[in-house]
Amino acid sequence: MGQTLFEKIWNRHIVTTVEDGPTQLYIDRMYCHEVTSPQAFEGLRKRGLKVFRPQRITCIPDHNVPTQNQNLPIQDPVSRKQVDILDKNAKEFGVNYYPIGHVSNGIIHVVGPETGLSLPGMTIVCGDSHTSTHGALGAIAFGIGTSEVEMVLATQCILQIRPKTMRITVRGRLKPSVSAKDISLYIISQMNTGGATGYFIEYAGEAIESLSMESRLTLCNLSIEMGARGGIIAPDETTFEYIKNCEFAPKGKDWSKFLAYWQTLKSDVNASFNKEVIFDAANIEPMITYGTNPGMSMNINDVIPTIENIEETSQISFLKALKYMGFKPGEKIVGKPIDYIFLGSCTNGRIEDFRIFANFVRGKRKADSIIAWLVPGSQKVDRQIREERLDKILKDAGFEIRQPGCSACLSMNEDKIPAGKYVVSTSNRNFEGRQGPGARTILSGVLIAAASAITGEITDPRTIC
Ligand SMILES: CC(C)[C@H](C(=O)O)[C@@H](O)C(=O)O
Ligand code: SF4
C-alpha cells in the first residue's frame, strides 16, 4: 500500500508512538503571536525552562496591531499590553522576532510563506487556527492551543493524535473570475462547516494544480472553516518557483538537495484516504455569504434559500442568521447597498490580491458612500504595492492603503465595523460580532469586494467593465 503525502511527512517526524495513544511529533517551525503565547512563555518561566530550539521559533505581533500610525505607541491599553508582553518574551527567550514596523512584520500566515520560513515537508504549528494556510506549500501545518505552544517551546515536539485523511479533488478547469476563495466557499457550502472535522485534507485535481501559489494559500487557509485539522497541496513547479527567491529558502547545493526531496512529496498512486470527495470546477461560480458562517454561501446571482430548502435541524440558526444580517429568505443579494469593504487578512491580503483589486479598479472611482479598508498582509506586501505602483492606481480610484496587520478581520484592534453596517470582506469568518459588535459581514473573494466598492452595492464583477 502506498502512502499519502500527509503520511510521508507525518511518518518522517515521528519521535515516538504510544500504542493506541498520541504520537510525539517533531516540529520544524513554530510561530507565536501576542494572543495565544503569553501563558506559554509564563509557564516556562515558572518552571525555570528555556526555549529548546529558539531558532525554530518566530514571534510576530499581528492581531492587536493598529493599521495606522504604527510609529506611535498603541493607544488601546489592552492591545498595548498584549504586544508589550510578546516583545518582552521574545527578547528574554532569545527567539526570532519581527516587531511592529520590522521589514518582515505582518500577519504570521502571510509572513511565513513569503519569507521561506515555511517550506515543503515541514511540520509547522502556531497557536492560531489559520496555521492551515502554510499547508499550501506541501507542509503539515495546524493550529494548536496555548498549553501545546508551551510544550513546543520547551521540547520542539508535540503530542498529537493522527488525524484521518481526506482528499478533495476539484476536476476540470475553473471558469474565468472564479478564485480560490470561491472554490473554498463552494466546498464549505456543499460540505458544511463541520464536514471535514477530524480530517486532514489534501487538495488535488486540475483546478487546484492550476492555482497560483498565493491562491493555494487562500484555499488551505479556509480548510479550518469546515472543521479540518489542516489542508495540504503537493508541492510542484509553482511551489518551487515561489520559494526559490525567498529569504530563508535553501540556496546553492542545498537547494538541489531539498528540491530532490520535495519532488517526492506527493501521494502515491495506490495511497488510500479515509475519505474521498470530488467536485467539478464547472459548477463553481463567484460566491458570497448571506449568513453568519462561511457555509451559508451561494453563487452571487442566486437568491437566499427559503426555509423549505434548509434542513430541519438548521432552520432556527438559519432564521437567526438572516435576522442578524437583515436579509429575508428568497431575496436576491446582488444590488444590496453596503457601507464598507475590507481587502486584507491572511486569506486575501497578499500581493496577488492587491494586484487583482488594483487591476479591477484602475480607471474607476470608489463610490462616495463606501469606506474602504485596504490592509496589506505584511510589510513586504506593502513594499511590493509601492514598487509596482499599485498605490498610485488605488489612490487615483479613491482608495487608501493602511499598514499591515489582522485589522478588521477580527475586532481585536482599532479597525472595527460599526454596529448594523454591512461590510463586504475578503476575510474568513462572519459570525455575529466578528468584525465588531453588531457588524454584518458578507464574505467574498477580491473581485466582488472591488466591484462592490465601485458601485456601493453587492455587485457581480462580471457585470461591470
Ligand atoms: C486569536 C486567534 C486565536 C484566532 C484563531 O485561532 O484563529 C484568530 O486568529 C482568528 O482568526 O479568529
Ligand atoms: S488575519 Fe484574521 S484569520 Fe488571519 S490570523 Fe489574523 S485574525 Fe486570524
Image (tube, rainbow, N blue to C red):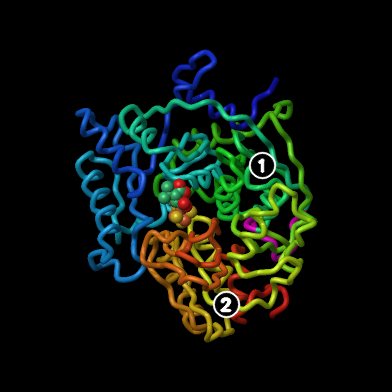
**Which residue occupies 55% across, 74% down?**
358
Q: Position of residue 413 (x, y in %)?
A: 36, 62
Question: For the residue with label 2, is its CB less than 8 Å from the closest atom of ligand 2?
Answer: no
For the record, the magenta segment spans 173-181
**Quadrant (top left, top right, bottom left, bottom right) of the C terminus:** bottom right
Q: Which residue is mark 2?
A: 453
Q: Which residue is mark 1?
A: 195
- Picture layout, residue 259 above or below residue 346: above
Mark 2 belongs to which amino acid? Answer: Ala
Query: Which tag, 1 or 2, sits closer to the chain's start?
Result: 1
- Picture layout, residue 49 above or below residue 350: above
Does any portion of residue 113 appear in the rendered image? no
Secondary structure category for the residue under label 1: loop
Mark 1 belongs to which amino acid? Answer: Gly
178 within the magenta span: yes
Q: Nearer the viewer, residue 426 or 207?
A: 426
Q: Position of residue 10 (x, y in %)?
A: 53, 27
Q: Is residue 300 left or right of residue 345?
A: right
Residues packed near mark 1 inside 10 Å, few (<14), some (14 to 19) or many (20 plus): some
Q: Nearer the viewer, residue 27 or 225?
A: 225
- Picture layout, residue 285 above or below residue 137: below
Question: Which numbered dot is residue 217?
Answer: none
Secondary structure category for the residue under label 2: helix
Q: Is residue 206 left or right of residue 342?
A: right
Q: Nearer the viewer, residue 383 or 297?
A: 297
Does any portion of residue 31 appear in the rendered image? yes
- Picture layout, residue 269 above or below residue 374: above
Q: CA distance from mark 1 to mark 2?
A: 33 Å
**Which residue occupies 68% across, 62% down?**
287
Residues packed near mark 2 inside 10 Å, few (<14), some (14 to 19) or many (20 plus): many
